[in-house]
């Protein structure tokens, strides 16, 4: 049993909880990769940057709320691409 953090309803025992991401931020990752060389003993590295999302906030929701949020809600900090989450 828990309180849904969206509608405030207390759920019945055994009802499934859904953790829904509501806020994210863009995070840049730096990957260190080993570059293949002619000499296997020589080690050369390069860095490659990639982007991703980091979870800032998530809420516990009942099944109905999580379905509704995924369909109609907007995740804060995540740009929309043609109305669909990229
Ligand atoms: Zn709810």
Image (cartoon, rainbow, N blue to C red):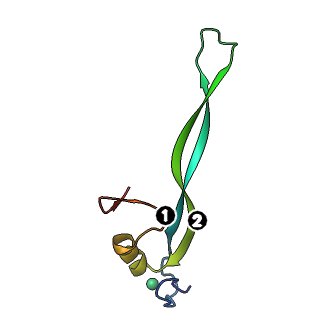
Q: Which residue is mark 2?
A: 56
Indicate whether 32 appears above or below 62. Answer: above
Between 86 and 41, the residue placed more toward the observer is 86
Question: Which quadrant is the C terminus positioned in?
Answer: bottom left
Identity of the residue drawn at 52% across and 63% down: 24
How far across and how far down the image is residue 39, in percent?
A: 64, 9
Q: Nearer the viewer, mark 2 or mark 1?
A: 1
Q: Which residue is mark 1?
A: 77
How far across and how far down the image is residue 72, in percent?
A: 34, 74
Identity of the residue drawn at 64% across and 25% down: 45
Indicate whether 45 appears above or below 67. Answer: above
Observer able to see residue 28: yes
Question: Which quadrant is the N terminus positioned in?
Answer: bottom right
Check disc 2: other Cα within 10 Å, few if <14, some if 14-19, many if 20+.
few
Q: Are marks 2 and 1 in contact (CB under 8 Å)?
A: yes
Secondary structure under tag 2 reads strand
Ligand 1 image-quadrant field = bottom left
């Amino acid at each position: 049993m828990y309180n849904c953090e969206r509608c405030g309803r207390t759920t019945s025992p055994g009802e499934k909880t859904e953790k829904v991401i509501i806020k994210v931020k863009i995070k840049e990752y730096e990957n260190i990769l080993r570059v293949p060389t002619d000499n296997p003993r020589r080690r050369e590295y390069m860095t490659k940057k990639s982007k991703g999302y980091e979870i800032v906030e998530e809420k516990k929701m009942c099944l109905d709320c999580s379905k509704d949020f995924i369909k109609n809600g907007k995740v804060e900090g995540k740009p929309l691409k043609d109305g669909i989450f990229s």
